[in-house]
Each structure stands twice: as C-alpha cells, then as structure tokens.
Image: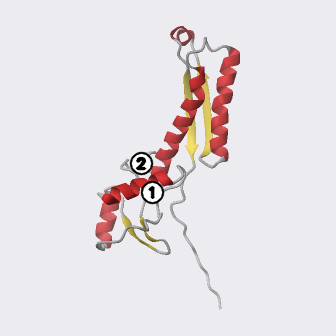
Amino acid sequence: GPIDGLYAGLISALDQKSSTTFKPMSSVRARWSLRKSVHDELIQSKIVLMDNVPIKGYAVVDGMTVASDVSDFRRLSTVRILHLVSQRIRAATIPFIGEASLTAAKKLALTTAIEAVYAKLAERGYLSDYRFAIEISKYDQVVGQVWVYHTFIPALETRRITHTYQFTI
C-alpha cells in the first residue's frame, strides 16, 4: 500500500548508517491505536510499525529486518552497511579485472585500493573495525582468480538510552 512506498522512501533518504528507528513519518496519520500486547506481538513477528513517539510524532518504531533475533542481519542499518561495503569494494577492485596476472606490485596496488575504501568508510563512521586478506594460489593464477577475505564490524546503532535519576533534598 501507500505506507510501503513512504517507508521505502524513508529508507532511501537515510544514510546507510542511520536506522529507521524513531524516524518521523510526517505525512502518515494513525488510523487506529493498538493495544500494547498486539503491538508487541506484531514487533515480535517482524512487522515494521509506526506509532506515536514522544517528541518525534508519528514515527517508525523499529528499523528491523525479518532475520531471526540471533542473526547478524536483524538490523536494517547493518544490512545497508554490508551492501555499501560490498558495492564500494567491488568498484575498487574492478580495475584489476582483465589485467595480466597479479604481480607483487599489482597485489600491493589491490591491497592499497581495498584499504583506502575501508579506511574511508571507517573514518566516516560506517565501520568500527575491518580486516582483509588477499590470497592467490598457483591454481588461482592459472584460472585468473583472486580471493579476498573480508571481516568487518559495522557501526552499531544506538537502540536504547536509559536514564537514572537521583534526587536529594
């Protein structure tokens, strides 16, 4: 329905490291109010809900995906950062495809190209940490294949801020 399009528009307007959680949907108005138990059940069923959020107005309740609760891909921002990293790394490595075998100098250039992408993403706050390794066996050289193994930690979104107050008289 029309809400799907508005939600997709919200996602596309946000930076990849920003979640849709508590982002206002100013053009959306509530048609009905849900009981807390129904609300919680829908959230547990991975249904994206909009609700009246203090200060923000009508907003997305949780920026989640349908992945299981134990999956690394349960947060929308994590999935979007993964796609961003993949796109940027692929773009950086394309110039090496179709070239002669990866000599030591070309392997260093490939390493530098990948490192530059990761460093920039980390500097801009998309990644907390990253590592990668390039492997080329004799067989890989014959078939023209290079393996790059990546490990990175995406920036994790703030999910809750808890306040504790102490009053004295």
x and y, in percent, of residue 61 in the image:
41, 64
Q: Nearer the viewer, residue 85 or 156?
A: 85
Q: Name the disc covering residue 70, or none.
A: 2
In the rendered view, tell whether residue 97 sits above or below residue 39: above
Q: Please name the residue shown 53% across and 16% down the image.
A: 145
* 109 sits left or right of 2 in the view: right
Q: Secondary structure at mark 1?
A: helix
x and y, in percent, of residue 86 in the image:
52, 35
Give the amino acid type for the residue marked by disc 2 in the picture: Val
Q: Please name the residue shown 68% across and 28% down the image.
A: 112
In the rendered view, tell whether residue 5 sits above or below residue 94: below
Q: Please name the residue shown 36% across and 71% down the image.
A: 29
Q: Nearer the viewer, residue 66 or 89?
A: 89
N-terminal label among 1 and 2: 1
Q: In this rendering, which labeled residue sits more in front, label 1 or label 2?
A: 1
Q: Please name the residue shown 46% across and 58% down the image.
A: 20
**Rendered image coloring scheme:** secondary structure
Other residues around mark 2 within 10 Å, as few (<14) / some (14–19) / many (≥20): few
Give the amino acid type for the residue marked by disc 1 in the picture: Leu
In the rendered view, tell whether residue 36 sits above or below residue 11: below
The C terminus - image quarter:
bottom right
Q: Secondary structure at mark 2?
A: loop
Residue sticking out furthest to the bottom: 169
Other residues around mark 1 within 10 Å, as few (<14) / some (14–19) / many (≥20): some
x and y, in percent, of residue 144 in the image:
53, 13
Residue, disc 1: 10
* 8 sits left or right of 102 in the view: left
